[in-house]
Each structure stands twice: as C-alpha cells, then as structure tokens.
Image (cartoon, helix red, strand yellow):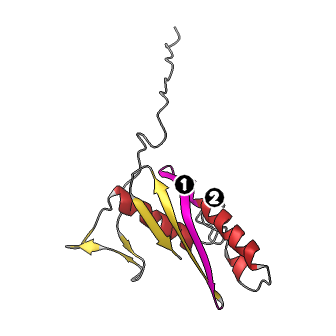
Amino acid sequence: MLPSIGYLQIEAQEEGQGVQMGRSFLYDFNSGDFVLKDGRLVEADPEAALCIWIEKLLRTEKRKYEIYSSSYGVSLEDLIIGQNLPIEFIKSEIKREITEALMKHPLVKSISGWRLERSGAQLMVSFKVNNTLEQEVMLGV
C-alpha cells in the first residue's frame, strides 16, 4: 500500500503582506559592534532592522567577500577609484547600483528623492527609501 500524498496549497499574498523577516539586532556602525543592554543584544524593530540592512548593504562591496553571495552589496569602487569617467555617467551608475541592490529586499517599494552633489573629489549621495512599513528612511552616503 502506498502512502497518500497531499498537495501543498500556497495563497498569494499582496506585496509586503505577511513577509516574515528573521530577528535582527541593533548595530552601531560607528563603534563597529552590536548594541548591548544589561549584557544582552538589543533586538531591532522592523524599521531599525531595515535601516541596518540598508547601511550594511551599502558598506559591502559586491563580490569582495566570499561569505556573501555574488549578488549582495554594491559595486561602487570601480566607478570611483582611479577612473576618469564623466561625472554624469558615474552618477547614473551609482543610482542604478544602489537601486538594484535595495530593491532585492521584500520591504523596499521604491527609491526616490535622489540628490547627487559633487564637492571637490567627493560625491555626496542621498535618497529616500519608500517601504511597506510606511516609514520614511532618508539616507546619505
């Protein structure tokens, strides 16, 4: 006698609805360590977890560290270091790289409010992350 095999039913959910994210802990990028309270890690709320994920992603150069998948991070070093490319091309590629990387997160809906300003040898980049949590995340790098 063969066992009865059931069928798995999956209900489609609206975008951003029912997304189960794992636990995340507050991280202080200035000190380079997790935030502790009474010797224990402090759990991040969904908004803080998203901000931490975004900052970590932007600080990680794509394909530089073997621990990350080849699609995690952004490729900005090639655009910035030692290149003599037109500034408009660099700005366009930075926007594309950041947008492609951030849109992989299930809570990110879109990126808007781009400002790219050159100041000497620096390029200041800021933008707004529109997410399904209905919280605004303004970033500057």
- Picture residue at 27% right of the left edge, 73% below the top: 36
Indicate the amino acid at tag 2.
Glu
Query: Looking at the picture, how far across and down is residue 125, in whole percent?
Result: 57, 75
**Cα separation between marks 2 and 1:** 10 Å
Q: Mark 2 = which residue? A: 100
Residue located beneath label 1 in the image: 110
Task: For marks 2 and 1, give the one nearer the viewer.
Answer: 1
Give the amino acid type for the residue marked by disc 1 in the picture: Ser
Q: Is residue 34 left or right of residue 1?
A: left
Q: Position of residue 116 (x, y in %)?
A: 61, 75
Determine whether, in the image, residue 21 is placed left or right of residue 100. left
Q: Where does the image place residue 50, in percent across and percent down from the top left?
A: 43, 60
Q: Of the numbered discs in the image, which one, if any, rests on residue 59?
A: none
Q: Would residue 24 be seen by someone viewing this image from the given angle?
A: no
Residue drawn at x 48%, y 56% is: 130
Q: Say which quarter of the image contains residue 83.
A: bottom right
Q: Farthest residue to the bottom: give it.
A: 120
**Residue 95 place in picture, x, y as percent:** 64, 66
As drawn, 121 above or below 12 = below
Residue range in magenta is 102-120
State which tag comes first along the sequence, 2 or 1: 2
Residue closer to the observer: 74 or 33:
74
